[in-house]
């Protein structure tokens, strides 16, 4: 090694952000391993690389003793005194033992260490970059499928889309560009593992931030998002400005903004509803597209009874209860939905029971 090698390490430090001192220490450690492998592992050795010139020196470290029993590890007091007159028994002395042909072995070991350190540093930088982007959206290209796992090329790294994070019935074709939500970033021995999702509610929220300037700028706030991925989702929005219609902003001119998101999610239906701090109004809005006649709430049980027009009952409940289920998750309230006719029948039954009870009380009194 020479001055050029030291300068090369300094260039790597500038380009890759890897300390040249850390590299030199790692190279010294690797050279020590190589020396022990090629020139005797029984020796207690130390290797030093001159920081300015790159010159490599190998030292054999020996303990000063009165009687030598292992010449690889010990040196007599008389021999040690020739090197240092002030040496005492029990001290450690170092003797240069640099092999004449050590340069070739050193160059090979140094090369491996530098490549490994660069690879680890790049992995570390990728890990930090994507760790800071957890909860963010990324665009990648589908590269391959292994079983049900889908691997997505993000440029600097590869992301893994697990079966549990895939939209049911959605197909992922090789070479296709898709947007995913970064769920988690793990550090592994093979580098960072980036786990992404197509089902996370955060994906829908981030898509609105991309497509709707008012959301990105914070004028329109997304209060809550719930999804049944690939089927239907509900988004509660609120405008901080009286001059901005929160729903209109998210829908966009001729529905272009929301349609762009629907296309990205392969046809997932999206209900955009207005958030309200009055739970009755919020619940009524959450049941969109159904119309609501009245909402009664029970604060203690966090439950609500909703009355809808007779012809809107099935719409309010939705296919297999989907609309009601999403509305309950969006609002955070238990929702019991009844039609006008059901409510009238329930009131009539209640009135009849009351009259029967009153009649019995009168009979007892008489």
Image (cartoon, rainbow, N blue to C red):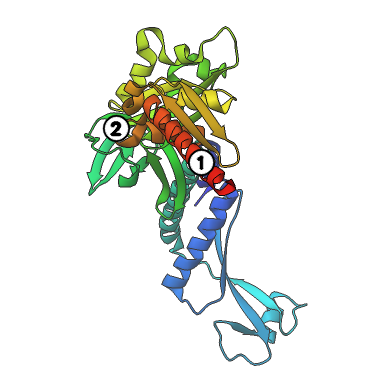
The residue lying at 38 percent from left, 39 percent from top is 197
Sequence order check, earlier mark of 1 and 2:
2
Query: 301 or 117, which is in the foreground?
Result: 301
Q: Label 1 crowding class (10 Å Cα cut-off): few <14, some 14-19, many 20+?
A: few
Q: Mark 1 sits on what residue? A: 359
Residue 106: x percent and y percent?
45, 59
Question: For the image shown, how many numbered marks are present on the structure?
Answer: 2
When the figure is inspected, residue 81 is found, relative to residue 126, above or below; the finding is below
Disc 1 and disc 2: Cα gap in Å? 44 Å
Q: Mark 2 sits on what residue? A: 319
Residue 139: x percent and y percent?
37, 29
Q: Secondary structure at mark 1?
A: helix
Nearer the camera: disc 1 or disc 2: 1
Looking at the image, residue 66 sits to the left or right of residue 19; the answer is right
The residue lying at 43 percent from left, 58 percent from top is 109
Per the rendering, the mark at residue 346 is none
Q: Quadrant of residue 86?
A: bottom right
Residue 288: x percent and y percent?
41, 22
Q: Is residue 129 visible?
A: yes
Residue 302: x percent and y percent?
55, 39
Query: 46 or 229, which is in the foreground?
Result: 229
Q: Secondary structure at mark 2?
A: helix
Query: 208 or 134, which is in the foreground?
Result: 208
Q: Label 2 crowding class (10 Å Cα cut-off): few <14, some 14-19, many 20+?
A: few
Q: Quadrant of residue 182?
A: top left
């Amino acid at each position: 090694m020479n001055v050029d090698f030291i300068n090369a390490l300094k260039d790597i430090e500038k380009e890759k952000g890897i300390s040249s001192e850390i590299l030199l220490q790692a190279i010294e450690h690797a050279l020590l391993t190589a020396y022990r492998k090629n020139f005797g592992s029984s020796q207690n050795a130390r290797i030093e690389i001159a920081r300015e010139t790159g010159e490599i020196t190998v030292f054999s470290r020996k303990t000063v003793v009165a009687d030598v029993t292992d010449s690889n590890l010990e040196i007599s007091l008389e021999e040690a005194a020739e090197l240092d007159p002030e040496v005492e028994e029990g001290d450690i002395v170092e003797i240069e033992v640099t092999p004449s042909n050590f340069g070739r072995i050193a160059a090979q070991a140094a090369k491996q260490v530098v490549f490994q350190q660069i690879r680890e540093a790049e992995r570390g930088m990728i890990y930090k970059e994507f760790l800071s982007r957890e909860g963010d959206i990324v665009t990648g290209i589908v590269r391959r499928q292994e079983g049900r796992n889908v691997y997505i090329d993000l440029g600097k790294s590869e992301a893994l889309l697990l079966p549990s994070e895939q939209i049911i019935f959605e197909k992922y074709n090789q070479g296709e560009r898709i947007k995913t939500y970064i769920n988690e970033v793990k550090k592994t021995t093979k580098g960072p593992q980036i786990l992404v999702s197509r089902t996370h509610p955060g994906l829908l929220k981030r898509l609105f931030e991309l497509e709707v300037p008012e959301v990105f700028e914070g004028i329109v706030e997304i209060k809550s998002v719930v999804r049944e991925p690939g089927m239907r989702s509900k988004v509660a929005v609120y405008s901080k400005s009286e001059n901005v219609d929160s729903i209109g902003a998210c829908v966009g001119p001729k529905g272009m903004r929301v349609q762009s998101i629907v296309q990205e999610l392969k046809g997932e239906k999206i209900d955009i509803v207005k958030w309200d701090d009055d739970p009755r109004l919020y619940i009524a809005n959450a049941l969109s597209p159904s119309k609501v006649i009245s909402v009664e709430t029970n604060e203690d049980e966090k439950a609500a009874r909703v009355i809808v027009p007779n012809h809107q009952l099935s719409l309010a409940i939705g296919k297999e209860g989907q609309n009601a289920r999403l509305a309950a998750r969006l609002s955070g309230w238990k929702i019991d939905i009844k039609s006008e006719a059901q409510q009238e029948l329930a009131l009539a039954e209640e009135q009849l029971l009351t009259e029967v009870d009153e009649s019995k009380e009168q009979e007892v009194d008489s």
